[in-house]
Amino acid sequence: MTWLGVSVTVEAVQAYKIEEFLAQQVKTSVSPRAYLAPLKTFFAYVLEQRLIPSDPMKNVRLPRTGVAAVKKSAAAAAAAAAATGSPTHVATTSGTSRIEDVEYVSRARHEEMKKELDRLQVDERQRISALLEEAIKDGDLSENAGYEDAKMRQGLLEARIRELESKLRHVALIEDQDNDGATIGVGSRVKLREIATDDEVEYQVVGPEETDPRLGKISHRSPVGKALIGKTAGEETDVVTPGGTTRYLIVSVERGA
């Protein structure tokens, strides 16, 4: 399927990824709430077609809006980092960024993102503009389904462009990260054993842009990713999801290729 102009697996579009998209809109002129209706309609249809096992919109929460909320979130992150002695900023391809803003991607994905942005800014904008012009020729815009559809496409396109522009400003390449290989970080390959069942599973921790559950690639911002970052082999960790809490033993950690 295509999610905001990107080809991804259906399972990859989880609640936290939708929340990340909505959070990107807080700093724009379009309220995140404006996207709820079309998103709910889309995922209801996908669920009806049995392309996904459950509706991710049921677990989506709207981000807090306004400058005060953004400042409060940043202050909380900075305080947490100071309390643990962790760095508050990370080197990126365009300078430095607050650690909570950093977008970790592979060098290959970074190039793909830049190419996608160029395509959306030129080819897709021209295509949507042509659709709008054609729809306007049909007359009364108040009952013009073609016009409304084109405007919705334009809104989603511009949202994806803003999202890519923001992410590219804060990109940190996974290959450039200083990781000793023993501590789990973005790029690490991890083997876990569920304490209750002894079942084992392997993951690679990646950035949200490269999440792919079919390949065992999970986001460092996902519940599992958050529970693993900073841990080492031999430690146990609890993963909290809407379905409950699961405890895992970290069997092994390897630095990703």
Image: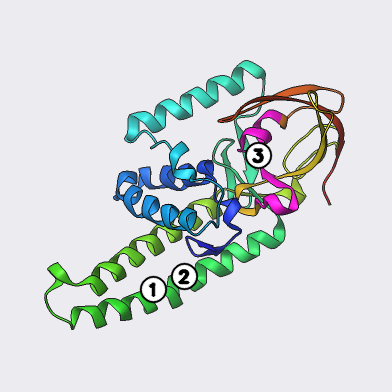
**To which residue does mark 2 refer?**
120
Q: Is residue 186 above or below residue 161?
A: above
Q: Is residue 246 above or below residue 59?
A: above
Q: Are marks 3 and 1 in contact (CB under 8 Å)?
A: no
Residue visible at 34% across and 51% down in the picture: 35
**To which residue does mark 1 refer?**
125
**Secondary structure state at the residue bearing disc 1:** helix
Q: Is residue 6 above or below residue 26?
A: below
Binning the other alpha carbons within 10 Å of mark 3 as few (below 14), some (14 to 19) or many (20 upward) gives: many
The mark nearer the N terminus, 2 or 1, is: 2
Q: Which quadrant of the figure contains the N terminus? A: bottom right
Give me the C-alpha separation between circle 2 and circle 1: 6 Å
Residue visible at 31% across and 78% down in the picture: 131
Type of amino acid under label 3:
His
On the rendered structure, is 118 left or right of 227? left
Residue sitting nearer the eye, 238 or 73: 238
Q: Position of residue 225 (x, y in %)?
A: 67, 36
